[in-house]
Amino acid sequence: MLKAIFEPGLFASEPVRVAVVVGGAVALVSAVVGVFTVIRGQSFAGHSLGDLGTTGGSGAFLVGANPLWGFVSFAILGAGAMELFGGRRPRARDMATGIVLGAGLGIAALFLYLGTTERNTTGATITILFGSMFVIRASMIPVFALLSVLALAIVALCYRPLLLSAVSQDVASARGVPVRTVGVLYLLAMAVAVSLSCVTIGAILSTAVLIGPAAAALRLTKRPGLAIFWAAVIGLAVTWIGIVLAYDSYYWPPAGRGWPVSFFVVALVLAVYLLADFASRHRARRAGARALASSEGPTAVAGRPRGPESTVLGAG
Amino acid sequence: MNGAFGSAARRNEVLSLDGVSLWLSGREILHEVTFSLHAGELTGLIGSNGAGKTSIFKVILGLEAPSAGRVLFAGQARPRRNRSIGYVPQSIGLDPDMPLRARDLVALGLDGDRFGIPLPSRSRRQLVDEMLEAVDARGFADARVGSLSGGELQRALIAHALIAKPRLLLLDEPLANLDIRSEQEVVALLATIAKQQRIAVLISAHEMNPLLPVMDRVVYVASGRAATGSTDEVVREDVLSALYGHHVDVLHVHGRILVVAGSDEVHHAEPESARTVVPRGLG
């Protein structure tokens, strides 16, 4: 039975071991950072950082450098640009993000075109856009670890100010929270998290591991600490199961060509989100039925027009 | 012994604005606004939309620096980070998915400005429970903040502000978007808080009638100017006419006050502002 799940040589394989360590770290960071991306309403910015990182990643590929540095430097530059042009109004922020993003993707298209035509290989395009955990060298592990710790440390440091400013920026700044500084620090953490997942999961799919586990965790709990915990657990689980499935898929009929890890991870993220969503709907229905059955039912329901039921519907 | 005999009013003074003017992008938003707030008193900051209420709040909170005049906190210049001011914003839209219970929101009032991760502590939890009790929020303490009704969220935010033991509580339009029952509950709660905890409470509202039974003092704002005193002293035709710069009618109807502020407000600081202040149900 176990042998059917873990195909021969799984744990002896060096690329698999590296993928388990690096993929795990990246999944953990993305999930934790992602909880705040979701509650701060910055999903669009998170996705854009990945696209901007692509510009750097493809540029690094063109000049023969390690794509990670390209991703990290361009995502951080992009975050800086968003902050500079954005200000605090959401519409201005989204517009600035969109403009920076468009320019970045255009340049990425050029770099990838030049890179692939010059070297006559399309593999790099696939690696940059869709990532590959199995081609990461073991020597890169310390770099991944350092960047992961940096992003997690920022979130831990700004935990309470981030929560308070997600509730209301005015309340936070009235209490003396340096809202802008906290926002910039968070953007930095997000840039690091996104570029790490760009290298492992791929630029296009990085949003899935940033937003997916966090969104599922928010369905499962109403406490901030637990939301982070569950997001981390889900992130780790989907990544590790994804690695095992990808390795196993080399043995699958008919051809035994092996499917990409990123596909499995993203498919699992979607499955977990749908499950969590279903569970919370189910719970809301049961809670609703209980409230109606109890004596004060009707007033309790009337007094809370945005109850758990509408919570589920509103998020679709 | 000299100077030890300040008047009672002066000793209780929590905050004073002294001739505060505010210019923003070339326009005068506030013109020599002067009033003071006292411990244990509930003050209504009354005016139509755009009259300058929010700007007065921003000046008190230190989010805008006055162009002229002074803001004094218990007779002193206001410190940069001030835990003595509790602030409850105008109805905030919270995402239903926000992973925060009412009790977490209250706890953030205690230490939401601190960096690092909080350690669970019994005294912290007890303080939060007491505060939830004080605003009658035990019933929904464990509900998501995004699922609370307007009145419930208002009470949670009041507890959030009160737990830091402020000397001054500012509430921006707390009665907007509330049904009549929640409105009465919130007004009664705020009056109790002011009296029992000896806090100065400042409530902004475009509609003064719900506050009439509990208001110790009114600051009436129009066109960036303010008049202050008891309701009887301020809400009079001569005072308000001087404030608006043209004739204003003040009508008393069944214990309610109706201010009809003409239609030719050429000197208005914000031309788009509402021209009449009409109590709900009579308009």
Image: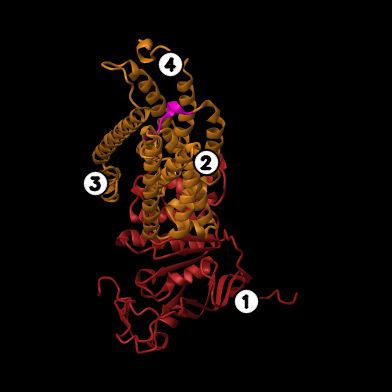
> Is there one chain holding both mark 3 and mark 1?
no
- C-alpha distance separating marks 2 and 1: 56 Å
Q: Amino acid at mark 2?
A: Ala
Give residue A298's mark.
3
Mark 3 and mark 2 on one chain: yes
Identify the secondary structure beneath mark 1.
loop
**Picture coordinates of residue A239, whole percent (x, y):** 40, 28
Based on the picture, tell me whether residue B148 belongs to the magenta stretch: no
Which tag, 2 or 4, sits closer to the chain's start? Answer: 4
Number of marks in the image? 4
Distance, label 3 to label 4, CA atoms, is 57 Å
At 49% from the left and 37% from the top, the residue drawn is A64
Tag 4 residue? A10
Q: Secondary structure at mark 4?
A: loop
SS type, badge 3: helix
The segment highlighted magenta reads A130-136
| Quadrant into which the C terminus of chain B falls | bottom left
Dot 3 or dot 2: first in sequence order is: 2
Chain at numbered mark 2: A
Instruction: Please name whichever residue, A216 or A1, is drawn nearer the observer in this view of the structure.
Output: A1
C-alpha gap between disc 3 and disc 1: 54 Å
Mark 3 residue type: Pro
Q: Colour of chain B?
A: red
Colour used to depict chain A in the structure image:
orange
From the image, tell me which residue sits under label 1: B7
Q: Say what amino acid the circle numbered 4 marks.
A: Leu
